[in-house]
Image (spheres, coloured by chain):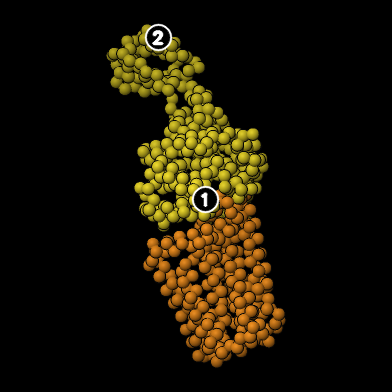
Chain colours: A yellow, B orange
Amino acid sequence: MALIEINDIHKEYVTYKQEKGFLNTFKGFFYREKQIKEAVKGISFQIEKGEMVGYIGPNGAGKSTTLKILSGILTPTSGEAHIAGIVPYQNRKQHAKKIGVVFGQRTQLWWDLPVIESFELMRYVYRIDEKTYRENMEIFTDLLELDQFSSRPVRQLSLGQRMRADIALSLLHNPDILFLDEPTIGLDVVAKQKIREFIKQINLKRQVTVILTTHDMGDIESLCNRVILIDDGLVQFDGEIEKFRHTYGKERCLVVETKEPEDIDRLVLDHGQITKREGNRIWIHFDRDQVSPTQLIPHITSQIEVVDLTIEEPSIEGIVSRVYQDKTKN
Amino acid sequence: MYIKLLQLQLKTLLEYRFAFFSQVLGIFIGYISTVIVYWLMFLRFDELNGWTFKETMYVYAFAALTINIAAIFFNHFKTMDQEIINGTFDKYLIRPHNVFFSYLISKFDVAEFANLFLSIAVLIYVIDVNHIHFTAVKIVFLFLGIIGAVLVNAGSLVLIGAVSFWTLKSESLYDTILWPAQFLSYLPMGIFPKIIQVLFTFVLPFAFISYYPSTITLDKVNILSAPGLAYSSIGIGIIFFLISLSVWNSGLKKYNGTGS
């Protein structure tokens, strides 16, 4: 049995319609029209121990809702979730001991006090024994350079430092599963790198299963071997990152540098389109299924004199943004 | 764990010494001004429906003490709506404890705790000026009365917190209902119309915050139309608190369902 198994999870929210106009606002005090919004419309997946899964999707796709169900904060409207044999929202307390949760935008650290105090407190909250606590603190200090700022009040920390502390805090009780909700939001490149490196180390050394939501595809590329893309409350893609690239990233880009800029005007293409032109360089986008580079390149070189050629793979970022845009068009 | 939390609260306090002292001072001024208002009132009447100035002060001191004790542990239930709106309430649901317990211990009002010494001193003083003769029974009921009253106060704070699960905005309830109701409980309830007395006995049991238990200490049980009420504060306190707690828990269940 997989470590995390969720089966046909649905989640509905009841919201109230807000009508415009003063009179309607007034009416709203007494009577409001109910609206049922289905945030999650039947999500199923399985995650094995030790996996690092990127959970992506546009804003409002249902990512946070799923994460909240998995961490036991929300009860789904229907469907079931089992994590290590426990139903998270029914056995919340038992479940809480096995998971670590980080909400990127809301710290769990004690705002006014030095970082170290929050760690001390968690030691009592989770009844962490002295030895485990000391070992973990050593590891975290080593990997995250906590000692640089552990005696400073949390409110004085930079966002990157705070996030490092938050992640370390969530791992203090040796959880089996770590849920990260946008762990690199608002961080600079170096801070992101540090966080990614740390998550990678923890996953490697302790076999901690990691599920992270993010809008930064760099996180996915450097950490995850698997992506689950959800949109509109449904799983749109679930599989290895390479397969993801393969499925959605059929477009390639050929960059051609010609000897004479005027040559470009003479070029006639059967497949693909010129998307950008800069001096004597052009960018040609083509669908790999329609034409292969081995067909396309001779077709071009037979017409014009080429100095240089490169083929660009699509970035995950580019693929995702295209997938999101296609969705909104529909 | 609780001790550790307490330490942290005290350390937080040191970060904001000025805010702390101004809060303590504010509470102190509140005390003094109430006493002055009552004193001015009693300059015009010798008695208030059979209650002397000193006896009224006892009712006030008793109420203030029990409100104070409840506030130490439960004051943050008043501002629970903020945590729910900001989404920080979620953190109590990922801890390996009961959610009510996790939230309860998350804060401890140190300024109210500092104020406790003043409340106790004032109560001892009014006991002294009223020349109360204590018997064993009266002492037992004094303590039971305090516990019952603290539970009524705590229950009403929990209830306000519980409301925020449904309306997301509950602090205004404190200003519009609880605070004026607490204010009424400072006075001997017998001076009010029957309807208010019934309301504050059976609906919101605020008469148990001080009026009913005070009648035992002040040997005034005979003025009550139902003397049994004076002895039932502890029972009423427990029942009211348990009801509040169950409302809070059903609110939590609703929160599990909607999470917003």
Provide residue A146's location: percent of width, then percent of height.
39, 46
* Gap between marks 2 and 1 measured at Cα: 69 Å
Q: Amino acid at mark 2?
A: Pro
Provide residue B34's location: percent of width, then percent of height.
49, 80
Identify the mark nearer the N-term, 2 or 1. 1
- Mark carried by residue A298: 2
Q: Residue B147's quadrant in the figure?
A: bottom right
Q: Secondary structure at mark 2?
A: helix
- Mark carried by residue A129: 1
Provide residue B151's location: percent of width, then percent of height.
61, 69
Neighbor class of circle 1 (other Cα within 10 Å; few <14, some 14-19, many 20+) is: few
**A169 left or right of A256?**
right
**A247 left or right of B242?**
left
- Judging from the image, mark 1 belongs to the subunit labelled A
Same-subunit check for callouts 2 and 1? yes
Neighbor class of circle 2 (other Cα within 10 Å; few <14, some 14-19, many 20+) is: few
Identify the residue shown where x is 46% and y is 14%: A292
Q: Secondary structure at mark 1?
A: loop
**As drawn, which residue projects farthest toward the front?**
A131
Identify the residue shown where x is 57% and y is 44%: A98
Q: Amino acid at mark 1?
A: Asp
From what the image shows, is residue A177 above or below residue B226? above
Provide residue A141's location: percent of width, then percent of height.
40, 45
Identify the residue shown where x is 56% and y is 77%: B63
Q: Decide if residue A229 is in sight here.
A: no
**A99 left or right of A260?**
right
From what the image shows, is residue B190 above or below residue B96? below
Identify the residue shown where x is 49% and y is 70%: B113
**As drawn, which residue projects farthest toward the bottom?**
B46
Q: Residue A9's quadrant in the figure?
A: top right
- Judging from the image, mark 2 belongs to the subunit labelled A
